[in-house]
Amino acid sequence: MYLCLASISISGILIGVLYWSGIKSGFILDGVISVHEFSFTLIYILIAIHISAAIYHRFLRDGVWNSMVPFWKEKLD
């Protein structure tokens, strides 16, 4: 996940630098934009998996939810 966040930041800066230097089209810019878009798609998927796993542990009632969400404690059986 951290690699995706770093990739989004670095590719965004590279897109800005390429535009600033006058490169508004070409293979390099297309590649950097593709990396940027792929990183965003991957981060959305990873966030969805993370939320799904949290909800799974909520219904499993194994105590993991209590450690992740300390303000919403549940009583364990």
Image (tube, grey):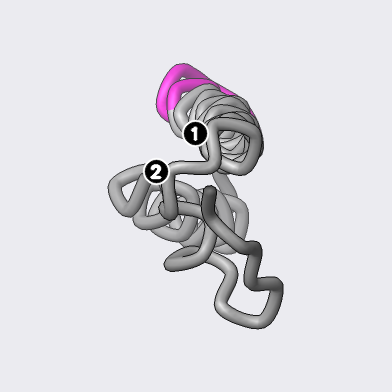
> The N terminus lies in which quarter of the figure?
top left
Residue 29 visible to an observer of this rendering: no
Magenta stretch containing residue 27, yes or no? yes
- Residue numbers of the magenta segment: 25-31
Q: Mark 1 touching mark 2, by CB under 8 A?
A: yes
Numbered disc 1: secondary structure: helix
Q: Is residue 2 above or below residue 48?
A: below
Taking depth in this image into account, of 8 and 69 the one nearest to the observer is 69
> Which residue is found at the position 53% from the left and 24% from the top?
38
Give the residue type at disc 1.
Ser
Numbered disc 2: secondary structure: helix
Determine which of the numbered discs, if any, sits on residue 29 in the image: none
Q: Earlier in the sequence, mark 1 or mark 2?
A: 2
> Which residue is found at the position 58% from the left and 26% from the top?
45
Q: Which residue is mark 1?
A: 39
> Which residue is found at the position 65% from the left and 63% from the top?
74
Q: Where is residue 52 shown, x and y percent of the image? A: 62, 30
Q: Where is residue 51 shown, x and y percent of the image? A: 63, 40
Determine which of the numbered discs, if any, sits on residue 4 in the image: 2
Give left or right: position of 40 versus 64.
right
Residue situated furthest right in the rendering: 72
Q: Where is residue 54 shown, x and y percent of the image? A: 56, 42
Residue situated furthest bottom in the rendering: 71
Q: Is residue 52 above or below residue 1?
A: above
Residue 22 visible to an observer of this rendering: yes
Q: Is residue 7 above or below residue 31?
A: below
Magenta stretch containing residue 6, yes or no? no
Q: Residues within 10 Å of mark 1 (few under 14, many from 20)?
A: many
